[in-house]
Amino acid sequence: MTFLSEVTTNTFERTSLSPGSYGSGKQPGLKILAYIEKASKMDKSGSMRHSFLVAATRPSKEALTEFAQGYYQGKNGGKHKLNPLLTEPDYEGTAFLSLTLNEYWLSPEATALAFTEASRNKEGVVQADYVAKALTSGEVTQESIDNAVAHFQQVATDKVIAANTPEESMQEAMAAQYRKELTQISIKVGQFLTLQDWKGFERTLQFNPTDLVNTEFSGKIEVREFNGKSGAEVSSIYSKAKTK
């Protein structure tokens, strides 16, 4: 076999997807095209940052609004008329999607604690006790929950000490950091579970992230900086509306 069969010729400039909201709770507007192996790495905390390439399956809400009005907003301000020959707004380009997960987060204990914490209202009252539900279902034990609480309390304590927090503020700072740790887990694991909803699979903490390729979902695209260069990134993943 000639070496020519292995010569890479697919060199092209990647176009960034325009910022905006794509899709809704009932209709997806984005699709995961590929899992980016080279960009998926473990961070210092031991969490795995999974990276995906995403494209749009339809125009953003903002693009549709501009199209209906017959103009678009320029980057430096001012309104510009759209090409009258266009039949629909442009939605070419790709964006990156990052999904950060930690093996310890993907346990029923950590997840139950995190989503219980995230359910607190402005007065600090828990609205949904997932720990109690997990205990009732037998997915966790009181001992395993206590161990998880101790683990995250230690994580919070270590961070507060590393920040040289004054001794008189230690207790308050540790409590705030503990809540912050659990809230972040609820956000990250929540994104993971939401994508499974869009995939049409039953939620599980053991789901392989690479199996999310080809999943269609809805979300928000924003422009971010990547190594000194600007690019498009999925900043929010919208929840899928429950069907009756």
Image (cartoon, rainbow, N blue to C red):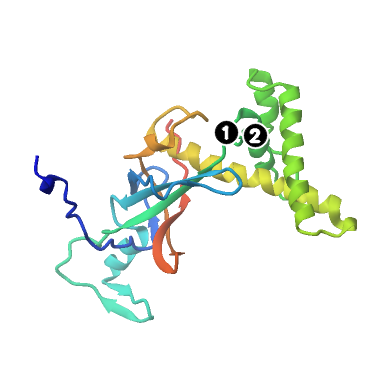
**Element at label 2:** helix
Mark 1: few/some/many CA within 10 Å (<14, 14-19, 20+): some
Labels 2 and 1 touching (C-beta < 8 A): yes
Q: Can residue 150 be seen here?
A: yes
The residue under the point 69% across, 49% down is 180
**Image location of residue 95, percent across then percent down:** 36, 56
**Image location of residue 117, percent across then percent down:** 69, 41
The residue under the point 25% across, 62% down is 90
Residue furthest to the left: 2
Q: Nearer the viewer, residue 1 or 231?
A: 1
Mark 2: few/some/many CA within 10 Å (<14, 14-19, 20+): many
Q: Nearer the viewer, residue 227 or 81?
A: 227
Give the quadrant of the C terminus. top left
- Looking at numbered disc 2 in the image, what kind of residue is underneath it? Ala
Q: Can residue 123 be seen here?
A: no
Q: CA distance from mark 2 to mark 1?
A: 7 Å
**Image location of residue 129, percent across then percent down:** 69, 32
Q: Nearer the viewer, residue 157 or 141?
A: 157
The residue under the point 49% across, 36% down is 193
**Element at label 1:** loop
Residue 106: mark: 1
Q: Horizontal placement of 148 versus 93: left or right?
A: right
Q: Horizontal placement of 201 versus 102: left or right?
A: left
Q: Nearer the viewer, residue 85 or 199?
A: 199
Name the quadrant containing residue 164: bottom right
Residue that numbered label 2 is attached to: 110
